[in-house]
Image (tube, helix red, strand yellow):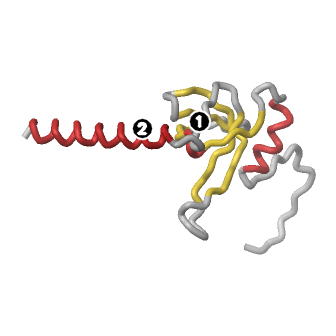
Amino acid sequence: MDNIHRNVAAKSELLRHQARGRRSKKPLVKMAKFAVGDYVLLGKVVNFPNKLALNWRGPYRVSRIESDYVMEIQQLVEPFATSVHHASRLKYFCDAALDIDDLKEYAVFGDEGFFVEDLLDARYSGHR
């Protein structure tokens, strides 16, 4: 039984290695190399019109690099949540030297939200 598992694992590793070799030989296909501190957009899969469509959200900041192709990104506004994504779902937003204050409003708007600085008035309408 252990022999079967070893053979399956070896075959799987060989196929993965061959697939990476094919991708690396394509001259026009280059995976972006990100560095800690880079600002990126995150591609989220859209259910409509097809499974290949991506909706780009962000910007986020690369907070940690786990491997050449896997990065941890962090939100620029509270709650400053982190998540791990493959480099194929990330693309450059702008230079890491950009001022963080300018990006806060853009980050909130990019995630389909709004940044409320001050609530001036509220009223109760009585309707549910």
Tell me which residue sits at (42%, 39%) in the image: 20
Residue 78, visible in the rendered structure: no
| Residue 97 relative to residue 91: left or right | right
* Quarter containing the N terminus: top left
Rounded to the nearest angstrom, the CA distance separating label 1 from label 2 is 31 Å
In the picture shown, does residue 19 fall above or below 46?
above
Residue 79 % position (x, y) = 66, 38
Could you say whether the residue bearing mark 1 is in a helix, strand or loop? strand
- Among all residues in the image, which is located at the extreme bottom? 127
- Among all residues in the image, which is located at the extreme left? 1
Residue 94 % position (x, y) = 77, 36
Q: On the image, numbered disc 1 is attached to which residue?
A: 82
Three-letter code, disc 2:
Gly
Three-letter code, disc 1:
Thr
Quadrant assignment, res 12: top left
Quadrant assignment, res 36: top right
- Among all residues in the image, which is located at the extreme right? 120
Residue 14, visible in the rendered structure: yes
| Residue 19 relative to residue 25: left or right | left
Tell me which residue sits at (58%, 46%) in the image: 89
Residue placed most toward the observer, 117 or 76: 76
Between circles 1 and 2, the one closer to the viewer is 2
| Residue 80 relative to residue 1: left or right | right
- Crowding around mark 2 (Cα neighbors within 10 Å: few <14, some 14 to 19, many 20+) is few
| Residue 47 relative to residue 118: left or right | left
Tell me which residue sits at (49%, 28%) in the image: 67
Residue placed most toward the observer, 19 or 85: 19
Asked if labels 2 and 1 touch by Cβ distance under 8 angstroms, the answer is: no
Residue 21 numbered mark, or none: 2
Residue 47 % position (x, y) = 57, 65
Residue placed most toward the observer, 27 or 10: 27
Could you say whether the residue bearing mark 2 is in a helix, strand or loop? helix
